[in-house]
Image: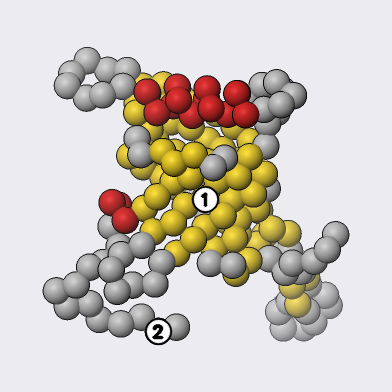
Amino acid sequence: MADYLRVNGNIVAYTSYFLTINGINYIGLTELTYGHKIETAYSYGMKRSGTPLGTTPGKYVPDPLKLKVYQHTAVALKTDLFNADPNFAGLSGFRFPVSIQWQEVNLNGTYIDFFNCRFITETVSLSEGSEAAMTEIELWPEYLIENGIPLFRPDNS
């Protein structure tokens, strides 16, 4: 799929995104950061050139999904997750799905699914001034898949 020039058209912006956590949509999101990578290493031998013999297959490492939300959204999210946990294991013990999608007119959408997320960090920010109270939340996914395409090689193990 090639990129194409968009003249006087819509381009993906912050308002193009939808956030769904454990089947519930949330709109009080102001910032979101995610990523993933394959950590690999060069394997060296006794070559005179000093160049590597090859690389290891590597291991898949997802970064935390970081959300910056209004405090009332954080309270709603925590309450919804706690009420959804049949074992009452606490926020860090409950695993849940997160989906992010963006869509604009005349553009193919993107769907990112985060699997088996855990709630790992919450930082509340209150400050003097006209700004609303904010909460930064980090969720720890086991893996993520964008548009059905994984970064890692899927297997059945």
Crowding at mark 2 (Cα within 10 Å: few <14, some 14-19, many 20+): few
Residue at 27%, 17% in the rendered image: 127
The image shows residue 109, relative to residue 113, as above or below, that is below
Residue at 30%, 64% in the rendered image: 104
Closer to the observer: label 2 or label 1?
Answer: 1
Instruction: Give percent across and percent down for residue 64.
Output: 56, 43
Q: Which amino acid lies under the numbered mark 2 shown in the image of this protein?
A: Ala
Residue at 67%, 37% in the rendered image: 95
Quadrant position of the N terminus in the picture: bottom left
Which quadrant of the figure has residue 96?
Answer: top right
* Label 2 sits on residue: 2
Tell me whether the residue at label 2 lies in contact with that at label 1, contact meaning CB atoms closer than 8 angstroms. no
* Label 1 sits on residue: 99
Crowding at mark 1 (Cα within 10 Å: few <14, some 14-19, many 20+): many
Give left or right: position of 12 versus 110: left
Residue 64 visible in image: no
